[in-house]
Image (cartoon, rainbow, N blue to C red):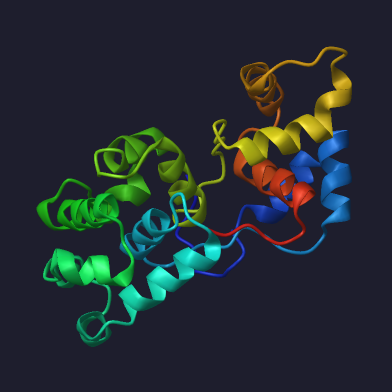
């Protein structure tokens, strides 16, 4: 379990992880091509989750527009993005920011979960990855993939493997595909990913970050 790290700071395990992962020839080649950068965290748990909901199934540009209207409304400018303040907004106001009806329910549900004790942010640092995921998926609109992104980009956990992330599967296939003579569908490559990634533990989050970088030089952030 990673120690608490301030937003934007390099995780304390990063240099050690890079050194360990360099034993994998393929991973070493990716890291050498992308020598700069590291996994950067976001500082506020509620904001991270609400931004993830905002961005579901719409473009980055559209998500930014909705988020800017939402976060910039007078009620939230005065109080900040606090669960109680969001819950005081009407459905009509939230639809006016650009949220769909389902996303209004999700945003309200997540905020309610922070208020009523469905989730326990103050305890997350001492909880296992799976225990945190089990709490988060109780919230509406939060599935396992979103919870895994939260582990990586908010809690900065070092050993997360989001096998349902199609970008990760694609990056793995392009980087490691030469090791197999046969192809296969997504499920096949996910099984191969799980097998190979056992050698990346306990730094699979770092390996995932580099495989994303192998597809796009821009650092991934959620």
Examine the rendering and report whether any part of residue 91 can be seen: yes
Q: Name the spot of residue 105 as percent of width and height, x first.
A: 21, 52
Q: Name the spot of residue 99 as percent of width and height, x first.
A: 31, 61
Q: Name the spot of residue 43 as percent of width and height, x first.
A: 42, 67
Name the quadrant containing residue 44: bottom left
Residue placed most toward the observer, 152 or 217: 217
Q: Residue at x 31, y 74 (%)?
A: 70
Name the quadrant containing residue 11: bottom right
Q: Is residue 90 left or right of residue 168?
A: left
Q: Residue at x 15, y 55 (%)?
A: 112
Q: Residue at x 33, y 82 (%)?
A: 72
Examine the rendering and report whether any part of residue 203 can be seen: no
Q: Is residue 51 above or below residue 125?
A: below
Q: Is residue 212 left or right of residue 69?
A: right
Q: Is residue 164 left or right of residue 27?
A: left
Give the total of numbered labels.
0
Q: Is residue 36 above or below residue 152?
A: below
Q: Residue at x 17, y 68 (%)?
A: 92
Residue placed most toward the observer, 80 or 196: 80
Q: Name the spot of residue 95 as percent of width and height, x first.
A: 25, 65
Q: Is residue 149 left or right of residue 161?
A: left
Name the quadrant containing residue 189: top right
């Amino acid at each position: 379990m990673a120690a608490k790290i301030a937003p934007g700071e390099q995780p304390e395990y990063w240099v050690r992880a890079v050194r360990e992962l360099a034993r994998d020839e393929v991973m070493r080649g990716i890291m050498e091509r992308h020598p700069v950068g590291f996994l950067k965290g976001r500082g506020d748990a509620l904001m991270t989750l609400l931004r993830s909901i905002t961005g579901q199934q719409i473009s980055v540009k559209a998500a930014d527009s909705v988020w800017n209207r939402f976060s910039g409304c007078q009620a939230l400018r005065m109080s900040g993005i606090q669960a109680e303040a969001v819950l005081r907004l009407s459905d009509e106001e939230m639809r006016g920011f650009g949220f769909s009806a389902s996303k209004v329910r999700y945003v309200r549900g997540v905020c309610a979960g922070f208020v009523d004790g469905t989730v326990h942010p103050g305890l997350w640092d001492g909880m296992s990855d799976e225990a945190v995921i089990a709490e988060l998926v109780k919230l509406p609109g939060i599935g396992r993939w979103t919870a895994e992104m939260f582990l990586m980009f908010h809690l900065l956990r070092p050993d997360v493997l989001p096998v349902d992330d199609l970008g990760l599967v694609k990056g793995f296939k392009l980087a490691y595909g030469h090791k197999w003579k046969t192809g296969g569908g997504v499920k096949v490559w996910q099984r191969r990913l799980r097998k190979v990634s056992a050698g990346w533990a306990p730094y699979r989050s770092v390996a995932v970050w580099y495989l994303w970088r192998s597809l796009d030089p821009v650092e991934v952030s959620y």
